[in-house]
Amino acid sequence: MTLLTVEGLAVSRGGLRAVEGVGFTLDPGQALILRGPNGIGKTTLLRTVAGLQPPVEGRITIPDDAVAYAAHADGLKPALTAAENLRFWAQVFGGDGVAAALAAMDLQALADRPAAALSAGQKRRLGLARLLVTGRPLWVLDEPTVSLDAASVARFAVVIRDHLGQGGAALIATHIDLGVAEARVLDLTPFRARPGRTSRPSGFNEAFA
């Protein structure tokens, strides 16, 4: 079963098209790395795939309840401990595996520490551990390694490879080499929208123009 199909996708930012004509698929066990210069629309494309904004054109096909999205915010409640944060997200998504998620991102020693007392790198590791308790097969990740040191990046690469090995998939925007050799790379530069093209989401009613 294909986890993600993108066909003829155009997305917009600030009322202007960013990229257009984008198409790809992700099957279980596959990862795709999005590349391109700053501002080309990687974040906008990811937000569109995650359902946070409508596409301008094209079609996105994803099974119901398949996506876990991680962007620049870590999604943590400062007053809760690391373990409590993961239990909260496990309950939201109906997943489990809090202890395994803490171990995967080397957070066992910090399980009882409030998120507010964690360093930036520790918060990022906890935010990424959240993916493991969602039970969602498709991870959509925007610069997931921000604030991570080299050892933590390598640890997260293992987490991604394990996820792929269990039939998951990942769509990732990143400027660094994650060390996931099996991942395909899609450069968005050739899909940059022509200058000056305004955008209207799919289904826009011209009566309201």
Image (spheres, rainbow, N blue to C red):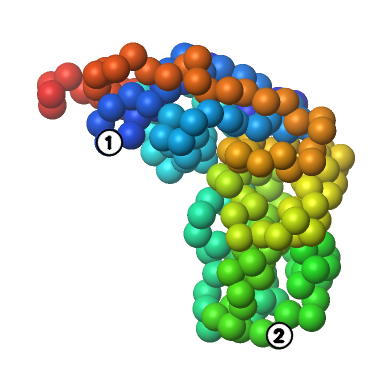
The residue under label 1 is which amino acid type?
Answer: Gly
Disc on the earlier residue, 1 or 2: 1
Residue 175 drawn above or below residue 116: above
Q: Position of residue 202 (x, y in %)?
A: 34, 23
Three-letter code, disc 2: Asp
Q: Residue at x 50, y 20 (%)?
A: 189
Q: Residues within 10 Å of mark 1 (few under 14, many from 20)?
A: few
* Image: 186 above or below 169: above
Q: Which residue is mark 2?
A: 112
The quadrant the N terminus occupies is top right
Please say if 93 is above or below 201. Answer: below
Position of residue 93 in the picture relative to residue 168 (left or right): left
The circle drawn on residue 187 is: none
**Image position, residue 10 (x, y; %):** 41, 21
Residue closer to the observer: 62 or 193: 193
As helix, strand or loop, the secondary structure at mark 2 comes to loop
Query: Which residue appears at 52% of the width and 74% of the height?
Result: 77
Instruction: Give the alpha-carbon distance from disc 1 to disc 2, as whole Å.
Output: 42 Å
Q: How far across and how far down the image is residue 195, in percent?
A: 29, 17
- Name the residue beneath numbered marker 1: 14
Q: Is disc 2 surrounded by few (<14), some (14 to 19) or many (20+) residues within 10 Å? A: few
Quadrant of the image containing the C terminus = top left
In the picture, measured across the screen, residue 162 lies left or right of residue 207, that is right
Q: Using the image, determine if residue 147 lies above or below residue 56.
A: below
Of the two numbered discs 1 and 2 in the rendering, the one whose residue sits closer to the viewer: 1
Q: Is residue 61 visible?
A: yes
* Residue 101 percent across, percent down from the top left: 77, 64
| Residue 172 horizontal side relative to residue 52, left or right | right
Q: Residue at x 58, y 30 (%)?
A: 35
